[in-house]
Image (cartoon, grey):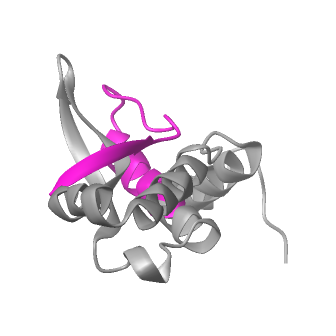
Amino acid sequence: MDYLCIGSKGYAQLGEPDFHMKNKIEMQVLLAYLENNFPILDEFSGMCQYKVKWFTHDFGSYSEIVLVYDDRLLDKWQDTENERYDRFWAWFIDVESANLESDALCKEIECRYALMNDNSLLPMKHETTTT
């Protein structure tokens, strides 16, 4: 098995105290976006899947969305089924071109983070509630 990087939004930044919560939300939103807008085609469903992969960096670990795929099968297709091989790469190029940094995705990540962040659900100290 091998993988191809698709990317991330970069909403969660290494070193931030809430990195792990932000990262989890970011990866969930991006995976759902890819699965809904760039579903794995039936002919490739048995040989690849979207995953979150962690990478090591000087300042810690970070994650990206990747496509894990059966590289041996893809190599076999290159030798025996050129059209299928070409369809895989054409499909992946479409996936890779997904705009994971769009305003809509950013807003969805921010909204989900706000819902998960207990402090964002509390009224501000200067606000008063009336009944």
Residue 130 vertical placement versus 109 (above, below): below
Residue 118 visible, this angle: no
Which one is nearer the viewer's eye here, 60 or 123?
Answer: 60
Q: Quadrant of residue 12?
A: top left
Residue occupying image coordinates x 60% and y 52%: 94
Residue occupying image coordinates x 74% and y 51%: 104
Total marks in image: 0
Which one is nearer the viewer's eye here, 11 or 94?
Answer: 94
**Left or right of residue 21, residue 47 in this image:** left
Residue 105 vertical placement versus 49 (above, below): above
**Left or right of residue 1, residue 11 in this image:** right
Residue occupying image coordinates x 70% and y 50%: 107
- Measuring from the top left, give residue 84's x and y in whole percent: 43, 67
- Measuring from the top left, give residue 46's x and y in whole percent: 29, 80
Q: Look at the image and give the residue range highlighted in magenta.
A: 1-30
- Measuring from the top left, give residue 11's x and y in whole percent: 51, 38
> Does the magenta portion include 41?
no
Residue 11 vertical placement versus 78 (above, below): above
- Quadrant where the N terminus sits is bottom left
Residue occupying image coordinates x 53% and y 61%: 29
**Left or right of residue 55, residue 51 in this image:** right
Which one is nearer the viewer's eye here, 116 or 105?
Answer: 105
Residue 78 vertical placement versus 48 (above, below): above
> Does the magenta portion include 25?
yes
Q: Residue furthest front?
A: 80
- Quadrant where the C terminus sits is bottom right
- Measuring from the top left, give residue 25's x and y in whole percent: 45, 57
Residue 47 visible, this angle: yes
**Left or right of residue 27, residue 73 in this image:** left
Q: Residue furthest right?
A: 131
